[in-house]
Structure formats: C-alpha cells, structure tokens
Image: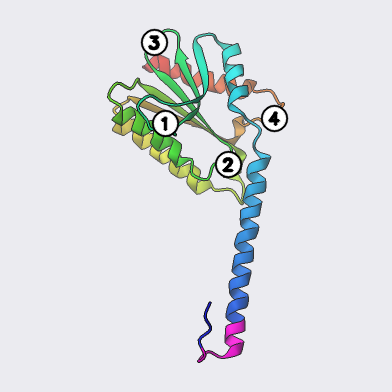
Amino acid sequence: MMKNPGINPDDWASFEASIRKKEERAESKRRQRKDLRKKFETLKPDDLGTALEQRSGEYMWSREYHPTGMDGRQRVDLVGRPHRGDHLVFIEIEGGRTHPIDNAVKAWRYSDEIVDSKPVMLIQIFSPYFYARTGNRRRMTEAIFIGRKAEVMTAGKLRYASLGQEYWPPSADSELDRLVQQVSSLIDDYRGRG
C-alpha cells in the first residue's frame, strides 16, 4: 500500500496492524476449514458404490460419471442406472466441498436442458463439516434450497433429497450400513412415486 504523506504515522501503523490481524484471522480460518474438510474425507464413492451393489443388484453403479450432453468436465460422484426402468440416481458426496450448490445446479441443468435426459433422483450427502462451527452451513442450506426448487421447476423430472451428518460414516473403515439403508430407502420411495 502506498502511504499518504498527510497521514499521522501512528494512525498508519495502527491501520497496518489491523490489516495484518485481519489477514491472520482469515488465514487461520482457512487453515481450520482445510483441516476440518480433511477430517471428514471418510466417505469415498468407491466404498459407497460397492456397498450399494452388495445390498441390491437392481442398479449398476458408476463412479465419476460424466452425464451425456453436459460438457466433458461435469461429473457426478456416483450414478445408479437400474437394470429395469428409465431413470438415473445421482449421488453427490459433499465432504467439504466449497460450493455444494454447483452439484444441485448440475443435476437441474441436466434435467432441464438435455432434451433426451432420463428422470433423475439427486441425493446429496453432507458431512459433519457443514454443521461445524468453522464449516459452512449456509452453503449447504443454499444447495438444499436449489435442489428443492429444481424439483418444482422440472415438474418432477428431477427429484431431490439430502442426507445430513447423522448418516456420515465416522471413519474411512467404518460400516456404511446405516447410510446405505437410508439411500436405498430414498431410492425405493422414488421408484414407488415415479
């Protein structure tokens, strides 16, 4: 910063000190968020896909799926395609993603813009990161809001559901039974309504 010669040197020093403190607090918060995100990297698409396949053979699960008609960089963490039926299940694992709203918008765009798109159920699974003091609950809330609005705006072509921290596995080697059971229940409900 350029120093204005008309400013009292003591005021300038105080101003610089306040800027430094603000930058230090921001950096500390970034480090806390990064550490918190790393703590909740306990749910991987491969593990969830394998557990869902073992529970039911009704779906074929693909990891890192690129939806047809979307630009090649768009991907979904886990996609279930039924052996019988004409729909898709998108699962997005939100461990600590900075902008989970992007995943809700991606599913909405797929359902709305791709002419020959199949009906979709989007399930977003939010880790405890979004509930923690240094996490970002607001971004989770916005993603859920957009997912619900997308469901209305697509006249049911997109169904939306979210799962919170109570279903997040506490460690990488923990059982996924509770989460798999809840995901399966959401899918069964979707198929029953669809």
Q: Which residues are magenta?
A: 5-13
Instruction: Find residue 35 and report its horizontal and vertical position in percent.
Output: 67, 47
Which residue lies under the disc numbered 1? 72
Comes first in the chain, label 4 or label 2: 2
Mark linked to residue 169? none
- Of tags 3 and 1, the one toward the viewer is 1
- Mark yes or no: residue 140 visible: yes
Judged from the image, the secondary structure of the residue bearing numbered disc 1 is: loop
> Mark 2 and mark 4 in contact (Cβ < 8 Å)?
no
**Could you say whether the residue bearing mark 3 is in a helix, strand or loop?**
loop
In whole angstroms, how far apart are the C-alphas of marks 2 and 3?
33 Å
Residue drawn 38% across the image and 24% down it: 68
Q: Give the labeled residue for mark 3.
A: 85
Q: Regarding mark 2 in the picture, which secondary structure is present there?
A: loop
Mark 3 or mark 4: whose residue is earlier in sequence: 3
Mark 3 vs mark 1, CA separation in Å: 26 Å
Tell whether label 1 touches label 4 (CB within 8 Å).
Answer: no
Query: Does 34 sit above or below residue 104?
Result: below
| Disc 4 element | loop
Q: Horizontal and vertical percent for residue 79?
A: 48, 22
Circle 1 crowding by C-alpha within 10 Å: few under 14, some 14–19, many from 20: few
Q: Residues at badges 3 and 1 in contact (C-beta under 8 Å)?
A: no
The amino acid sitting under disc 2 is Gly
**Left or right relative to 164: residue 74:** left
- Is 159 a magenta residue? no
Q: Amino acid at mark 1?
A: Gly
Q: Quadrant of the C terminus?
A: top left
Which residue shows up at 48% across the image and 18% down it? 80
User: What amino acid does circle 4 point to?
Assistant: Ala
Kindly identify which residue carries mark 2.
Answer: 96
Q: Which mark is residue 172?
A: 4
Q: Viewer-proximal residue, 88 or 129? A: 88
